[in-house]
Amino acid sequence: MSTALPVLKVEDFTSDQDIRWCPGCGDYSILAQMKKVLPEIGVPPEKTVFISGIGCSSRFPYYVNTYGVHSIHGRAPTIATGLKLTRPDLSVWVITGDGDALSIGGNHFIHLLRRNVDLNIILFNNRIYGLTKGQYSPTSIEGQITKSTPMGVVDHPLNPISVAVGAEASFIARSVDSNVKHLAYTLKRAAAHKGTSFVEVYQNCNVFNDGAFSYAQDKATRDDATIELQHGKPMIYGKDRDKGIRLNGLNLEIVDLSQGKVKEDDLLFHDEQANSTLVYMLSRLRRPDFPEPIGVFRAVESQTYEDAVRGQIDQAIQQRGRGNLQKLFSSGETWKVGA
Amino acid sequence: MSTEAQPTSHGKAVKTVSGITVRLCGDSGDGMQLLGTQLTNTSALAGNDIATFPDFPAEIRAPRGTRAGVSGFQVQFASHEVHTPGDTLDALVAMNPAALVTNIADLPKGGLLIVNEDSFEDKDLKLAKLKVNPLEEPAMENYRLIKVPITRLTKQAVAELGLSVKEADRCKNFFAMGLVYWLYGRNMDATLRYINGKFGDGTSSIAKANEKALRAGWAFGETIEALGHSYNIEPAKLVPGTYRNIIGNQAMAYGLMAAAHRSGKEIFYASYPITPASDILHELCKYKNFGVCTFQAEDEIAAVCAAIGASYGGQMAVTSSSGPGIALKTEGMGLALMLELPLLVIDVQRGGPSTGLPTKTEQSDLMQVMFGRNGESPLPVLAAQSPADCYEIVQEAWMLATQLMLPVIVLSDGYIANGSEPWAVPDVAKMTPITVAHPTESNNPDGAFMPYKRNELLARPWAIPGTEGLMHRVGGIEKEDGTGNISYDPDNHQKMVNIRAQKVANAAKLLPSQQVVGPQSGELLVLSWGGTYGACLTAVQNAQAEGCSVALAHIRYLNPFPSNLGEIISRYKQVLIPELNMGQLRTLIRSRYLVDAIGFNKVKGKPFTVTELQEKICEMAKSGARSPTHSKAS
C-alpha cells in the first residue's frame, strides 16, 4: 500500500490564535524555528502533541496547530509520560521553563529523564520568572537582583545540563534562541533521537532579565563566550578559532592554539557517546572562566520506557495468551449455590 | 439458634449453630492474616455467608511479642446472611500475652479462649509489659480457657522432617488452624491445596511440615477432653449462582477490568504506593496479558497527571490513593475537571488527618473529595458499601466519567478494602456495553473543530490525538464554551462554571433512585454511606425485629445525591446519620435538605459495632417524643 505523502508546510502547523508574548521575547524565535522544522521532521499535525506546564513558554501549545495540553505548573512531563505510555504512536513535545521544569516540577523532570520516555523536552531558560513578573528562578545567578531578591539572589543556581547528566538522560543539548540555524538543527536532532531528548535553550526575557545571555547571542561576543560541540571534532572556539579545550587529568583547561605549542590533536575531541563523567565536566564549563558549550552534549541509544513497558505487556500476552475475563473471575476456589 | 450436641462416630458431639465469630490474634510475624484468610476461604467454600475484618499494625515487623505488633483477623461465618464481621466473639485465639491482653475485652463471659501457653513465659510477659501472667488472673474463670502448648506440639509434629528451630516454629499457625478447623467442622482440603501450591508440590519439607502441623492441630481437637464437642454451621441460603470469596481491593481491580471490557478500552492505572490502596495496584499489575498498563509514578501528583495524559490519548485512565495522596492529587483533579476528560480517582480512606492511622479505617475524606479543590469544582462522588460492591461501583463510576466527560471519585475505605465477602461470579457474556465514542469528523464543518461543543448531557466530544482535522488544544485556563479557546470573558466564565456544575448534576439522570430498607415512612430514617452499610443494615434489621419504626437508606451516590432522597427524608420524623467521622455527610444533608439530622459519630479507627448502632437507633425510634423539626426537605 503506497500513498503519496502530502508535503507538510509551515502553515500546516500554524494555529489561528493570537500570540501573546511580549514583543521582543526570545520565545518568538523558538516558536518560529519549531514551526520551520516540524514539516521537515515529517510527522503530520494530528500525530503531534505539545504539552506544557505553566509560565510564559507554556503558552506555546496554543500557537501550533497540533494536539496540545496547556497543563499545570511543573506537571507536563507526567502528562506526557502517561500519553506516550498509552499512545506510543504519537510524537510528543514538552515545552517548559526554568521554574516549571527545575523548581516546581523538578521531581518529574528527573524521573522523565531517567525513564527515557521517547519524547522531546525543550526548556526555555531565561533565568527568571516572567509570567509572575520577575521573581528569581532556580537558574538565576547568585547576586541577581530581582523583584523577590532586592539584595541579590543567595541560592546556588541549578545547571540544567548537569541535572540531566545526573539523571542519565540519553540526549542532552543546548542552544540559543537567536542562533536560529543552530536552534533548528538542535530541534531536528532532538526529534530524531529515540528516547528523552532534552534541549536547554538560552532564551532572553527582554522585560525582566534582558541581556542575561547577551554574551551567547551578540555577534561580537558569542564566538569567544561559547563553544560549539561537534561530534568527532576537536573542541576549538574563538573568533579566530585560536582557543581550545584540553583534558588535563580530571580537569578541563583552555589552551592557546595561536602559538603552535598545542596542536589540535592534543585537544579534547567531542564524543556524544562519551561517558557521563566527561559529559558532566562539559556541563560545568561556565562563564566567565570558560566558554559555555552549545550543541549536543550527549546522544546515546538506550531502550525507551514505553518500549519496555509495552514490551512486558506483549510478553505477558505471548506467554499467557490474551486474558479471559470470565476465566479470571471464575478462578480460585469457587462454590455453587443451588436454586 | 443451636441444636443439642449430637454424638458422632468419632465419639465427640457436634453442635449445630447458626453462626460463629472468631478472632485470631498473635504477633504480626505469626501468620495470623494467613490463618484468617484460610479460615475465611474454607468457610466460604462450605457455603456459609462470611464477613471479615483484618486488623494489623502499620509497622511491618513491630518488635516481636509487643502490644504494638499484635495482628488480628476476625471472621464471622454463618448459615444466615451476615453483613459484618460480628460484634462479640464466640472464640478468641491468642498466640501470645500481648495478643491476649489487647483483645480479651471483646470476648464476652463464657466465650471460648484458646491460647498458646508456650508463649506465656517471663520474657513474653515482659515484652507485653505484664507483671503477672494473665492466664493466672481470676478473671480467666469467666472464659472457657483452653491452654494449648502449641509451640511444643508443633515442634513434635514436624520433628521427623529435620527443620531448623525457626522453621518448625513458623508452622505453629497451621497447628492453631487445624484446631480451629476441627472445632468448627471446617474441611481441610482447600488449605492443603494452598499449602502445596504455596510451599511446593507436597514434597518440600516446608509443605509437609505445614500439613503435619495442620493435621496435628485437628487431632488435638479431637483428642483433648476440655473440648467436649465441635460445631457445625450449615450453608447459608444465598441467591443461586457460583460464588467465590473476594477482598474489597481485589473487587475494585476486577471492577475496573470489567469496566474496561464493557467500554472496549484498556486500563492505564497510575498510582503511588500508599496504604490501604496499594493492593489494587498489586492486583492489576498481574494482568498485563489483559492489556492492563500499570504505572508506579514518582509521586501522587505524577500519578494523577499521567492518568490525565492517558485519558487525553483515549485510554481508560485511573488513579488511586488514600487521603494524604488525594490531597496531593487535588490540583490534577481540578485540571482534569477543566479539560473535561474522563478519569477515575479512587480514594481508599484511612484514619486521618495527615498520616493519621494508615492501617485503620475511617470515613473522613468525604469533605475533601467534595470540596478539596480550588474554585467552583464539583465532581461526582460514589462510595462502595461492601467489599463486593467495589466491583459494581467502579463500573458505575466509569460509565459516568465517559458519558459526562469528567473525573469521578470512588470512595472505599480500609475496612472494605481489606475485608472480604462472598461474591457471585458475574457472567461476562451478559455484560452490557458502556458506549464510548471518539469522533472522527469535525462537529463544525465550516470552521475549526469545536472541542467544547456539547451534547444533551453537556458532555463534550472525546476527540483523541491521531485524528486528522480534529487538532485542538485543552488547558487549565478558563476557556470559551464551544471553541475551547482561552477566554477571560466574565459571562463566559459564569456560563462555564454553571455548565460544569450542571454536568455533575446530570449524573443523577444516569443513576438509579434511592431505595429504602424497611417501612416507606415512619419514625426514624437511618442514612448511611460507605463501608458502614453492613453494620447499619444489621442494626436496622435488629431494631425492626424489636418493633422499632425505622428504615435504612444507604447512599452509594454522594454527589449528586439521588434525585428522590429529599422526598424520602421528608417521610420520616427523625433522621439519624451514623458515620466514622465527625459528621461530614450530616453537614451535607443538613445543608442540602434543611433537615435536623442527628449524628452518631465515631473516629477510633474501628468500624461500628452493630450493638452500639442498634442502641442508638432504638433509643431514637422509641423516644418518638422528639417533634419533627424538618419541613422543607425538597
Image (spheres, helix red, strand yellow):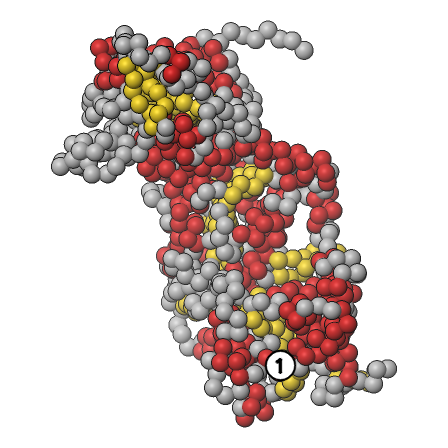
Q: Is residue A336 left or right of residue B378?
A: right
Q: Residue at x 67, y 57 (%)?
A: B423
Q: How many marks?
A: 1
* Residue A282 visible in rendering: yes
Q: Against B610, is A162 above or below?
A: above
Q: Position of residue B281 (x, y in %)?
A: 56, 48
Circle 1: is it few (<14), some (14-19), or many (20+) Cα within 10 Å? some
Q: Against A217, is A288 above or below?
A: below
Q: Amino acid at mark 1?
A: Asp
Observer-nearest of B149 and B46: B149
Q: Residue at x 66, y 77 (%)?
A: B151
Q: Is residue A116 left or right of residue B174?
A: left
Observer-nearest of B427 and B543: B427
Observer-nearest of A330 and B563: A330
Q: Position of residue B322 (x, y in %)?
A: 47, 53
Q: Position of residue B288 (x, y in %)?
A: 64, 40
Which residue extends farthest front?
A: A261
Q: Residue at x 22, y 10 (%)?
A: A220
Observer-nearest of A7 and B576: A7
Q: Residue at x 42, y 77 (%)?
A: B625
Which corner quadrant holds the C terminus of chain A?
bottom right
Q: List the residue tagged with mark 1.
A: B118
The image quarter containing residue B23 is bottom right
